[in-house]
Image (cartoon, grey):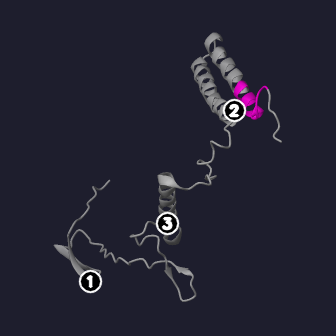
Amino acid sequence: MEPVHRGLGRCQCCFWLAVVFDIVGLAVLLIGVFVNVFFYDLLIYAGAIVIFLSLIWWVFWYSGNIEVPPTELEDDVGLLKKDKGGIGGVVRRLSSRVSSGIRNSFRRNGAPSGTRRGQAQRSAAGLPVAPQAEQVVVAMATMGPQENTPHIVSSVAGCDIEMPHTTTESSPT
């Protein structure tokens, strides 16, 4: 038999936290309004924020005390009715099959099907192997101000790339 909750309901801790936040927030707000201090605006804003945060505790208290009869929870928490006939049962079974199929494909692949991102390569022992990163070669040359090379040709991944000659000069200090 379930205990009967009177007065404040089941979530008394949330209720008292909400009340404390309201009292502290109101006190800080009123101190900011009526006490002559140079940081009164900080107190006003802080009090308003604390009162706003008390709303979280009020929502927790209220939603924790909502009572729903088990007959209304049947569809929401998986307690399906015994009679699965009619169009509702067909739609429910179809929806369940589609959603479980999608859920299982995410679990198997780690990503939506059709992408290779979530599929890891496996070694002969069945352990996942990290994919090999493509190596990029960058050619750099140091040039003095007297050199007059118009272009530098470098080979990157089998392609010849021409780079124009650029120099940076600095003024003597």
* Residue found at x 42% / y 69%: 113
Give the quadrant of residue 68.
Answer: top right
**Magenta-tinted stretch:** 7-19
85 w.r.t. 18: above or below: below
- Reading the image, the residue beneath label 3 is 101
Q: Amino acid at mark 3?
A: Gly
Nearest the viewer among 77 and 35 is 77
- Reading the image, the residue beneath label 1 is 158
Looking at the image, residue 21 sits to the left or right of residue 40; the answer is right
Q: Is residue 149 visible?
A: no
- Reading the image, the residue beneath label 2 is 61
Rendered location of residue 118, percent (x, y): 47, 70
Q: Is disc 2 surrounded by few (<14), some (14 to 19) or many (20+) residues within 10 Å?
A: many
Nearest the viewer among 28 and 129 is 129
Q: Is disc 3 surrounded by few (<14), some (14 to 19) or many (20+) residues within 10 Å?
A: few
Mark 3 or mark 2: which comes first in sequence?
2
Q: Amino acid at mark 1?
A: Gly
128 w.r.t. 90: above or below: below
Cα distance in 3D space between marks 1 and 3: 45 Å
Looking at the image, residue 146 sits to the left or right of residue 59; the answer is left
Looking at the image, residue 158 sits to the left or right of residue 45; the answer is left
Mark 1 or mark 3: which comes first in sequence?
3
Nearest the viewer among 60 and 97 is 97
Mark 2 or mark 1, whichever is nearer to me:
2
* Residue found at x 44% / y 79%: 132
- Residue furthest out toward the bottom: 124
60 w.r.t. 122: above or below: above
